[in-house]
Amino acid sequence: MMDSETDQLCVTKSFSSRSTDAGVGTIIGNSGDERKLRIFSIAGQCMLERTAQEMQSYNHVSDLIHMLCQTTGMKPCRLVLLDGRVRLQPSQGFKALWPPLDDFELQVIVVPGPSLDLGHELTLKCAEFLTVQRLGPLRLAVRFQCGKLLETIQEEVTLNHRVTLSVPSCFRQVHMTSAETADASDADGVVELHLESFFDDVMSTCFRELKMHYSLMTLDFWVTGEFHSHLGGCKRQQCCHGADLQGLVRTTLVLCLYWLSDLFSTASSLWLVVMMLTGNVTGLLPLLFSLWLPGLAFSWRFHFYIHGRTCRGFCKSEFCVARWLCGMQPAGLIIASVVLPAYFAYKMILLILHLCDVSAYEPPFPLNPDMFALYEIYMRDVRLLGDVPRSVILLCLLLFSNTALPQAKLHPALVGSMLALLLARLPHRSRMRHEAWRYFDHIIMEEEDLNEPN
């Protein structure tokens, strides 16, 4: 290595990392034979300590380098001694630099060997993914072919591998888990990922198996020398495809059950409204209000959040009750609550067909987290402000009203509303709704606040 290159390397290192504890710092006022020579590493570790009496027969820097080689086992060409920031030449005498009454402290650095000159790139064979195996709900085993160093060098090196699992890009929060192995001697390596932290975030209940299929795996391979110096590396990436097929089918069936119950509740209520319109039956206005009210609550909440979570008034902004009542926004929300689940279910069925080798087409991530979160929040308003009052109205019509409409036509709407309310109370659906609210509050609306002009 050229002197200029080594000096450039030395400048980047700090000479002030030594400990100031007793026995390590410079001792002032020692007698001649009690003076000590100490040589420190960059990390502050004392590599060599000798008294002035022990150093009487040594005169040159090369003698100190030879002592360090015997202690550390390194080659002399890789050791450089510094006095402050000045490099000492091997042929230089060191006793002229030793203060007459003080200890003498030097620093040693390890430079790359002749085959690892600055700017030289190692020839590597990158590690490659082999198989991914799901060991349990929260464990994943990744088997890979270890990377190799395809050239012989003088320096002792360590081959390192790390597998990182990160969430799909459609989630706007960075979340990942990783496992690392070093100095793999076998042709194949295996790391086991523990997924407790990977699933401990918003929307993990809704998308657990989907995350395991679409998450991105990164296999990093790098070579490190002594003192953890980075000598080179490369990486490979691929989708995880670690979802359990049975778990994915179960998730699809559960979500479809929720969506069909929501669809049945909305469709039966709309059908009853049509029947009442054609039969001129009392109770029509309360039923229409139970269909319209959830859209009003959802729209007003979104308006409240998008304006810094402050109430600006109904008529002092673009949101106005009169415009909302005359517009198509409530009808649009009702249509969206039917179309979105159907589209999500279609994409998930396509994914299952692909995993069963029925179809070669692999759809992108089936669910849009933003749309899914907004859908769950809207359906929460539908449960509280739609199904609850509608169930009360229908029970009153069945028990106390002598309406001309046959009671049998009231039963589907009542059953649909009661079934939707019961399913909404299930622990899994309740947690989905809670995670959807967190995603809406902490991710969607936080970005809206950042994009809002001051």
Image: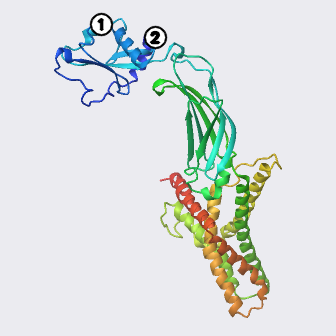
Q: Residue 9 sits in which quadrant?
A: top left
Type of amino acid under label 1: Asn
Residue 430 in picture, x, y percent from top left: 60, 67
From this view, report whether residue 121 is shown above or below residue 256: above
SS category of the residue bearing label 2: loop
Residue 420 in view in this figure = yes
Q: Which residue is mark 2?
A: 2
Residue 390 image-quadrant placement: bottom right
Viewer-proximal residue among 184 and 117: 184
Label drawn at residue 323: none
Report helix, strand or loop for mark 1.
Answer: loop
Give, as a three-letter code, the residue at label 2.
Answer: Met
Relative to 200, residue 278 above or below: below
Residue drawn at the location 66% of the way across and 35% of the way down: 144
Q: Which residue is mark 1?
A: 59
- Label pair 2/1, CB-CB below 8 angstroms: no
Dot 2 or dot 1: first in sequence order is: 2
Q: Nearer the viewer, mark 2 or mark 1?
A: 1
Residue farthest top in this picture: 91
Q: How is the image coloured?
A: rainbow
- Using the rendered image of the protein, determine whether residue 295 is visible from the camera's viewpoint: no
Residue sitting at 54 percent across and 14 percent down? 115
User: Rounded to the nearest whole Å, what is the CA distance between mark 2 and mark 1?
Assistant: 25 Å
